């Protein structure tokens, strides 16, 4: 065989072989880098990029502070959770001693055991330490110990308006009060940062695939609550309850011309900063909106307004009060049995005559309690006064109460006779206060609210306009007549408690409670209420106050409204006249 | 490097760009030097240029990364200052809380007015 031919043949084979190998590489690279570009690019990005949540700052809550000023009720401050990866902790004793010295009472129980557990990768050592403590801990440079920043909700005014506010739990969720009701507005929306990071996880500004969606902080809310009024009514309620040895009570103060709540207090209360120390969870509830009850004789004002507005009775109408009235097989009695005889509609308020309220219902039916009377009263209660419906106030857990319609078997004559003086139906205090405000302001029902407006980024406030829910629930003239009747009744029944020169009016309410043992109304206990308003004339009410005392220890339970709730009303009313600079006539 | 010489006989006087005037029967000679780079030189030059471009690219990328660290540091500082501001606001609010004000010595020394009078219009 020719040697040169053989060499030429080998070389050619080698070249062809090399070309094939080269082609395989080229094809493979083409496949990986061109065809599979998207897949491998994504895989690489996954390795190099990290996602960071940019937490939104929870909106702050402010109260009015007299005039146009505001004062903070709920703020945020930075706090830190201290954790450790026990595998990297070199000196357990030194770490524990340093933590105890710096974090003090913020260390978690038995954190030393967690430090010693080398099989664990994460153990919490201390919670909610302050910025200063965090700085000291960082300076100590403890191996294996890290910190995670998080916002902590703080309430600088302590327990002031606690139930109106609610609190924020460890998961950052608002609980109770406005914290829960407006949680989505307050919480804001977290942002997102998706970026290429280095080995330490620090985001780098390289690459065109970085994504940054800034966090949207929660709205700062300005409440219609005035902190001075709130503080005063809380103290007045406490003093009033102490006098009658009661433990449970509520007060609400409303501007009748806007529906804005100026103060709302409940006892017992709690400190939102230390909500976890509270064992009685009912203290978290804002009973003014969450606790419907048979409000008793304060409802007579609503029955009377319906009768006056329908023309069924007039302020000077009279009836023969016999002390009792028989409806079917039930007998309805007055508490006061010494004022029998001919009585006017004003005296129905003055002596709180149940028979007088039933008389108004009879007149609505043309002289008898019938379907027409029941339909009319039901219409006023539900369509005019909005009873049986949630008001929509910005508070968690609002209840609608209960009004039995007249077309149901239980909505019979006896029930409707009882309803005229506030039994056999249930309302929340906010429902009654809102409807009463409408009744005395000329007939405009404003949606009750605790929100005055929202704070802008420049510190100014955008005020929320008052929202009219229904106009002309009664005619303005009827409203003024009713105001005069209540004013006269108060002046005659509760003498010497009001400041001279002012127009203060109202009505007591004492509701029997059902004894859980017998299932029947008991005379041993009653819920006392007072519902009234003040201003300088019958056409210019400046505030509405409703007081409820749930467990007054008074000699006669039937007078709980007068003995327990009325003094608290008078105390607050007289103070408000000065605080609101109401000039006497 | 290579060079070549071109001999041109010019029988006619030139015009236009040639500013010289030629005498009759004068032979003129022009030498045109044509020098160029060989293939190896080209390759080396391209490689050097690519290296320079690569270095410039790397410098810019590194600079961008450095900016990333600077931005991160500044953001951390900003967060820390914002936290300090919030802490001070909370401290200020606590100091001005109604309960604290009511219990202060100044407030305790105050008296309640017995009567409020208003000037009549």
Image: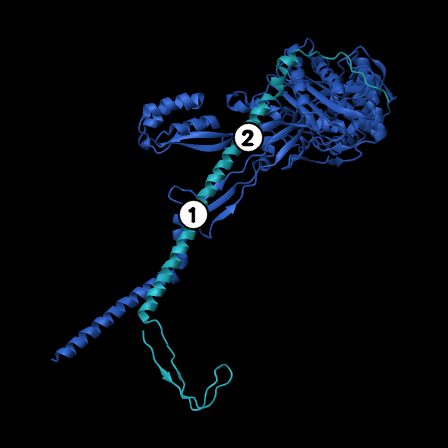
Chain colours: A blue, B cyan
- Verify CB contact (< 8 Å) between mark 1 and mark 2: no
Residue closest to the far top: A555
Whether residue A471 is visible to the viewer of this picture, yes or no, is: yes
What label sits on residue B65 in the rendered view?
A: 1
What label sits on residue B86 in the rendered view?
A: 2
Local SS, label 1: helix
Q: Quadrant location of residue A432?
A: top right
Residue found at x 39% / y 24%: A99
- Chain letter of mark 2 equals B
- Mark 1 surroundings: few (<14), some (14-19) or many (≥20) residues within 10 A: some
Q: Earlier in the sequence, mark 1 or mark 2?
A: 1
- Residue A423 shown left or right of residue A484 in the figure: left
Residue closest to the far front: B23
The spot of residue B97 in percent (x, y) is: 61, 21
The spot of residue A396 in percent (x, y) is: 60, 31
- Residue A136 shown left or right of residue A284 in the figure: left
- Chain letter of mark 1 equals B
The spot of residue A519 in percent (x, y) is: 62, 19
Q: Quadrant location of residue A558?
A: top right
Whether residue A52 is visible to the viewer of this picture, yes or no, is: no
What label sits on residue A44 in the rendered view?
A: none
Q: Quadrant of the C terminus of chain A?
A: top right
Residue closest to the far left: A1
Q: How many marks?
A: 2
The spot of residue A322 in percent (x, y) is: 82, 15
Instruction: Tell me if residue A35 comes above or below residue A414 in the rendering.
Output: below
Q: Quadrant of the N terminus of chain A?
A: bottom left
Q: Is there one chain holding both mark 1 and mark 2?
A: yes
- Residue B110 shown left or right of residue B38 in the figure: right
């Amino acid at each position: 065989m020719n040697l040169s031919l053989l060499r030429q043949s080998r070389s050619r084979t080698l070249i062809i072989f090399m070309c094939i190998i080269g082609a395989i590489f080229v094809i493979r690279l083409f496949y990986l880098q061109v065809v599979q570009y998207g897949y491998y690019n994504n895989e690489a990005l996954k390795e190099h990029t990290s996602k960071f949540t940019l937490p939104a700052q929870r909106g702050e809550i402010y109260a009015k502070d007299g005039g146009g000023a505001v004062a903070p009720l709920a703020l945020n401050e930075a706090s830190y959770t201290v954790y450790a990866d026990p595998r990297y902790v070199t000196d357990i004793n030194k770490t524990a001693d340093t933590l105890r010295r710096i974090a003090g009472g913020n260390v978690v129980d038995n954190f030393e055991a967690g430090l010693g557990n080398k099989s664990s990768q994460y153990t919490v050592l201390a919670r909610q330490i302050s910025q200063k403590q965090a700085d000291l801990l960082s300076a100590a440079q403890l191996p294996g110990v890290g910190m995670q920043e998080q916002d902590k909700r703080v309430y600088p005014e302590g327990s002031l308006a606690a139930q109106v506010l609610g609190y924020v739990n460890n998961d950052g969720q608002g609980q109770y009060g406005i914290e829960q009701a407006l949680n989505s507005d307050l919480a804001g929306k977290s942002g997102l940062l998706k970026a290429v990071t280095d080995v330490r996880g620090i985001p780098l500004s390289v690459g065109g695939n970085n994504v940054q969606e800034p966090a949207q902080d929660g709205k700062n809310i300005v409440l219609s609550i005035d902190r001075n009024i709130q503080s005063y009514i809380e103290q007045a309620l406490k003093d009033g309850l102490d006098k009658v040895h009661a433990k449970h009570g509520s007060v609400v103060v409303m501007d009748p011309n806007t529906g804005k709540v100026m103060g709302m207090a409940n006892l017992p209360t709690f400190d939102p900063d230390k909500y976890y120390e509270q064992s009685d969870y009912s203290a978290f509830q804002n009973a003014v909106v969450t606790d419907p009850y048979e409000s008793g004789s304060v409802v007579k004002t609503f029955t009377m307004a319906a009768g006056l507005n329908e023309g069924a009775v007039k302020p000077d109408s009279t009836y023969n009060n016999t002390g009792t009235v028989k409806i079917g097989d039930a007998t309805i009695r007055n508490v006061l049995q010494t004022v029998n005889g001919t009585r006017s509609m004003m005296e129905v308020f003055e002596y709180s005559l149940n028979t007088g309220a039933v008389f108004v219902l009879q007149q609505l039916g043309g002289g008898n309690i019938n379907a027409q009377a029941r339909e009319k009263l039901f219409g006023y209660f539900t369509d005019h006064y909005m009873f049986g419906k949630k008001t929509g106030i910005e508070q968690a857990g609002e209840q609608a109460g209960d009004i039995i319609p007249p077309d149901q078997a239980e909505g019979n004559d006896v029930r409707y006779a009882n309803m005229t003086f506030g039994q056999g139906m249930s309302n929340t205090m906010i429902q009654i206060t809102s409807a009463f405000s409408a009744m005395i302001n000329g007939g405009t029902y404003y949606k009750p609210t605790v929100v005055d407006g929202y704070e802008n980024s420049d510190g100014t406030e955008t005020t929320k306009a008052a929202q009219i829910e229904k106009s002309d629930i009664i005619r303005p003239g009827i409203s003024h007549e009713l105001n005069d009747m209540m004013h006269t009744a108060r002046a005659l029944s509760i003498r010497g408690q009001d400041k001279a020169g002012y127009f203060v009016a109202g009505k007591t309410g004492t509701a029997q409670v059902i004894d859980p043992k017998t299932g029947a109304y008991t005379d041993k206990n009653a819920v006392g209420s007072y519902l009234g308003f003040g201003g300088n004339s019958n056409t210019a009410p400046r505030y509405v106050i409703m007081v409820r005392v749930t467990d007054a220890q008074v000699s006669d339970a039937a007078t709980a409204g007068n003995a327990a709730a009325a003094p608290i009303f008078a105390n607050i009313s007289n103070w408000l006249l000065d605080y609101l600079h109401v000039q006497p006539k | 490097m290579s060079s070549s010489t071109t001999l041109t006989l010019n029988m006619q006087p030139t015009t236009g760009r040639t500013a010289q005037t030629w005498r009759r029967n004068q032979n003129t000679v022009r030498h045109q030097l044509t020098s160029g780079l060989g293939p190896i030189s080209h390759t080396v030059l391209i490689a050097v240029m690519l290296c320079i471009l690569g270095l410039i690219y790397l410098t810019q990328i590194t600079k961008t990364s450095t900016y990333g660290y600077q931005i991160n540091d500044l953001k951390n500082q900003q967060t820390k200052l914002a936290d300090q501001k919030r802490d001070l606001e909370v401290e200020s609010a606590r100091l001005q809380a109604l309960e604290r004000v009511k219990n202060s010595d100044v407030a305790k020394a105050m008296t309640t007015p017995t009567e409020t009078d208003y000037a009549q219009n």
